[in-house]
């Protein structure tokens, strides 16, 4: 069996293109050791950790293995904040990384975690030629929570908690 057509989609918690004749490991350092689990047909749901390598192998021929991807976790964003260009009640987050995709949501809670319900409705912003997100509607006392969004080979970053600006 040739182990081709297999990939990862960290954002969807999947190893894609697997078959029942395969196994995977998330903790192997060299494709031989580690804990191996049976893959499922088509796509296998997994809980990725970072940093770490994703290996697959033939169930009946364990010496036929390959590394599919290296999963990483980015650093937490550290945006600055200022009044948004639309005036009172809008916030601008600057100091972000160009060509990255962020997600954020606004709440009255000063801290949240990744399991918070707000992330399911988070606003996604892909920066292209920009280092800021402008005009985030937030009122006095609310907080903006932002993180780098997960992609195919990267977990979401930890969450940065940014207090909203006060109205002038």
Image (cartoon, rainbow, N blue to C red):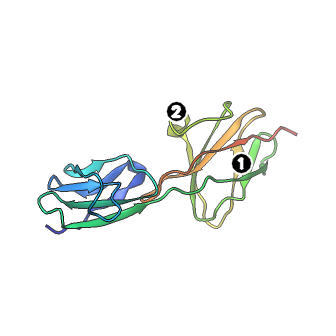
> SS class of the residue under badge 2?
helix
Query: In the figure, is residue 113 to the left or right of 144?
Result: left
Residue at 59% x, 49% y is 147
Q: Quadrant of the N terminus?
A: bottom left
Q: Quadrant of the C terminus?
A: top right
Query: In the figure, is residue 155 to the left or right of 29?
Result: right
- Residue 2: horizontal and vertical position, in percent? 17, 69
Which one is in front, 124 or 31?
31
Mark 2 = which residue? 117
Asked if 33 appears above or below 106 in the picture, the reply is below
Mark 1 = which residue? 135
Which one is in front, 118 or 154?
154
- Residue 161: horizontal and vertical position, in percent? 67, 42
Select label 2 or label 1 by which is in front: 2
Residue at 75% x, 43% y is 90
Q: Identify the residue at the far right of this view.
A: 168
Asked if 56 appears above or below 157 in the picture, the reply is below
Query: In the figure, is residue 168 to the left or right of 82?
Result: right
Mark 2 and mark 1: Cα distance apart in space:
23 Å
Residue at 33% x, 58% y is 28
Q: Callout 2: few (<14), some (14-19), or many (20+) C-alpha neighbours within 10 Å?
A: few
Q: Callout 1: few (<14), some (14-19), or many (20+) C-alpha neighbours within 10 Å?
A: some
């Amino acid at each position: 069996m040739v182990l081709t057509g297999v990939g990862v989609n960290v954002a969807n918690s999947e190893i894609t293109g697997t078959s029942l004749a395969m196994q995977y490991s998330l903790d192997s350092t060299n494709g031989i050791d580690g804990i191996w689990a049976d893959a499922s047909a088509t796509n296998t749901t997994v809980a990725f950790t970072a940093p770490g390598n994703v290996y697959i192998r033939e169930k009946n021929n364990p010496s036929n293995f390959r590394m599919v991807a290296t999963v990483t976790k980015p650093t937490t964003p550290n945006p600055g904040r200022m009044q948004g260009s639309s005036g009172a009640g809008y916030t601008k987050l600057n100091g972000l990384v160009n060509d990255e995709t962020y997600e954020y949501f606004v709440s009255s809670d000063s801290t949240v975690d990744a399991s918070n319900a707000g992330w399911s409705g988070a606003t996604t912003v892909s920066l292209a030629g920009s280092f800021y997100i402008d005009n985030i509607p937030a009122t006095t006392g609310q907080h903006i929570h932002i993180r780098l969004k997960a992609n195919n080979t990267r977990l979401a970053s930890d969450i940065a908690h940014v207090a909203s600006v006060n109205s002038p």
